[in-house]
Each structure stands twice: as C-alpha cells, then as structure tokens.
C-alpha cells in the first residue's frame, strides 16, 4: 500500500484552512484524514488542524491489530468524537474562535476492506477497475435538495448554496457520524478530498487522472485541475493505492 497527499490554498484564498494527515499502522494497514475548516480567519485553521491531530493521535493509541469491522467502526467513531469535543471546548474558551468547525473524512484500510467515517462535505471515492464510486454522501443543504428531487446533481454543482453544510465537527457537543465500507483489493485506489477538489473536477476527470498517473504525479494533477478550473477554494487530496 502507498499513500500520497497534497494540500494547496488555491488561487484565491489567502490562507489554507484544509488539513490532512495519513500514515501506516504497525501491522501494515493504513489510515488517512482530511478536514476542511470553517469559522473566520483563524478559526478554520485551528479547527481543521486540531481535528486531524487529535484523530490521528487517538487512532494510533486505540488501534489494535485484528480488530473486527464493528470494532474498527466503533474505534473510528470514538476518535472523531474526541476531536469534536476538543474543538468545541476550544471554541467555547476563546471568543475569537466561536463558531469554528470542520468537515471530516477518515479512512482506515484494514486487510481487504476500507472503512470510512465522515461528517460534512469532504468526500471519499473508491476507484476499482474502470469505475469511480462516491462512497460518502454530503451533509449539505444542496445535497438535501437533491435527495428531495428539487435539484439534479448537475444543478447542485453550480448552486450558490453548495458550500452550506449541515454537519460539522466541533460546532456542537454531539456529532452524528456516517459510516461506509468497500472492498479494497490490488489495483484499487481510495481518494479522500475536500470540496475544493470535488467541486471543481468531475468524477471522470479524477478517475482518469488517478488511473493514468503514478501516485505523486496523480495527486499533483488533481490539484492542478482544480486550480485550472478557478482554484477559488483550498484543495486537498489523499490517494491510497493498494
């Protein structure tokens, strides 16, 4: 397994409020985290960096080789909830950080399965063969409109409210987390990204880039594609190759 990542502030924003961390576990399994912060000039940076660091620390502390799927999902949930409380408390204690929060998507690759947990609109995609499958469903106002049949997916990509999310880590003392999983076999790729990529590169572009390029070059081309399309948001991508 190989992991490649890049985060970029884009062409418009003055700061990068995205954060990511990834690594290998002692038994050869892998993990990755992407967060996209929100909440003023400083709050978004603090929320996303605090979240990825806390989740990573808790993953390293609590992961045990040989965990079952349900044990892994429970452990991932506890790691995210620990970060949620930490960010929430920081925001309550510092007036300048009030209202800060962050999206979160976490993946743990264990054996031949990828386990994914998320809140917000940062995404996980699974590339297998010639298919690219979006594993996560955005927690956003626009996605809710799509679910109700009020918008098509094409209309949603251009909607002015597409950045309004309905769940975020650190905003409230409690957080609902969604989980999913998929097979992860030789030749498969798992992509975690912030909406700075998914809003400005379509699935066919991302799939072709990941399939036609080696790891580091693929991640660089994903970022370049989003920047070529305007680069109006921070952009983060983590690609895990089996």
Image (cartoon, grey):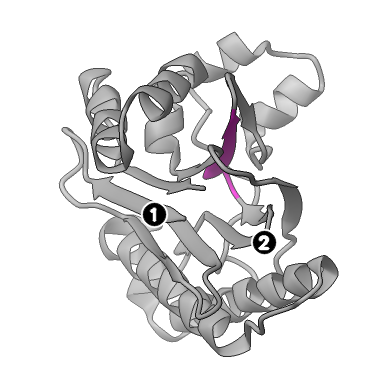
Q: Please provide the residue range marked out in magenta.
A: 120-128
Residue displayed at 72% across by 21% down: 146
Residue 157's tag is: none
**Secondary structure found at label 1:** strand
Residue 124 position (above or below residue 66):
above
Residue 126 picture location, percent across and down: 60, 36
Q: Pick the residue in front: 162 or 226.
A: 226
Residue displayed at 55% across by 42% down: 123
Asked if residue 69 lies left or right of residue 61, the reply is right
Any magenta on residue 125?
yes
Residue 237 picture location, percent across and down: 37, 44
Prevalent SS, magenta region: strand
Quarter-wise, where is residue 52 in the image? bottom left
Viewer can see residue 66: yes
Asked if residue 63 lies left or right of residue 192, the reply is right
Packing grade of label 1 (10 A; few <14, some 14-19, many >=20) is many
**Secondary structure found at label 2:** loop
Residue at the front extreme, as displayed: 186
Residue 96 picture location, percent across and down: 33, 73
Residue at label 1?
3
Packing grade of label 2 (10 A; few <14, some 14-19, many >=20) is some
Residue at the bottom extreme, as displayed: 61
Residue 104 picture location, percent across and down: 54, 57
Residue 172 position (above or below residue 211):
below
Asked if residue 61 lies left or right of residue 237, the reply is right
Residue displayed at 36% across by 22% down: 212
The CA span between labels 2 and 1 is: 16 Å
Any magenta on residue 231?
no
Quarter-wise, where is residue 226 in the image? top left
Residue 111's tag is: 2
Q: Pick the residue in front: 28 or 160.
A: 28
| In front: label 2 or label 1 | 2
């Amino acid at each position: 397994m190989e992991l490649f990542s890049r985060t970029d502030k884009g062409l418009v924003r003055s700061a990068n409020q995205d954060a990511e961390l990834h690594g290998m576990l002692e038994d050869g399994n892998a993990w990755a985290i992407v967060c996209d912060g929100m909440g003023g000039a400083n709050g978004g940076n603090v929320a996303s960096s605090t979240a990825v660091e806390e989740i990573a620390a808790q993953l390293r502390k609590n992961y045990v080789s040989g965990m079952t799927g349900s044990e892994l999902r429970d452990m991932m949930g506890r790691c995210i909830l620990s970060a949620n409380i930490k960010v929430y408390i920081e925001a309550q204690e510092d007036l300048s950080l009030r209202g800060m929060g962050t999206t979160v998507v976490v993946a743990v690759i264990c054996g031949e399965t990828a386990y994914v947990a998320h809140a917000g609109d940062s995404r996980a995609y699974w590339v297998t063969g010639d298919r690219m499958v979006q594993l996560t469903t955005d927690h956003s106002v626009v996605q809710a409109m799509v679910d109700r049949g009020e918008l098509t997916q094409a209309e949603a990509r251009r909607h002015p409210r597409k950045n309004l999310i309905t769940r975020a880590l650190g905003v409230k003392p409690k957080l609902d987390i969604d989980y999913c999983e998929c097979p992860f076999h030789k030749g498969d790729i798992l992509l975690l990204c912030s909406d700075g990529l998914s809003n400005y590169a379509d699935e066919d572009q991302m799939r072709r880039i990941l399939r036609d390029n080696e790891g580091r070059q693929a991640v660089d081309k994903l970022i370049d594609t989003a920047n070529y399309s305007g680069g109006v948001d921070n952009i983060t991508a983590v690609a895990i190759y089996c």
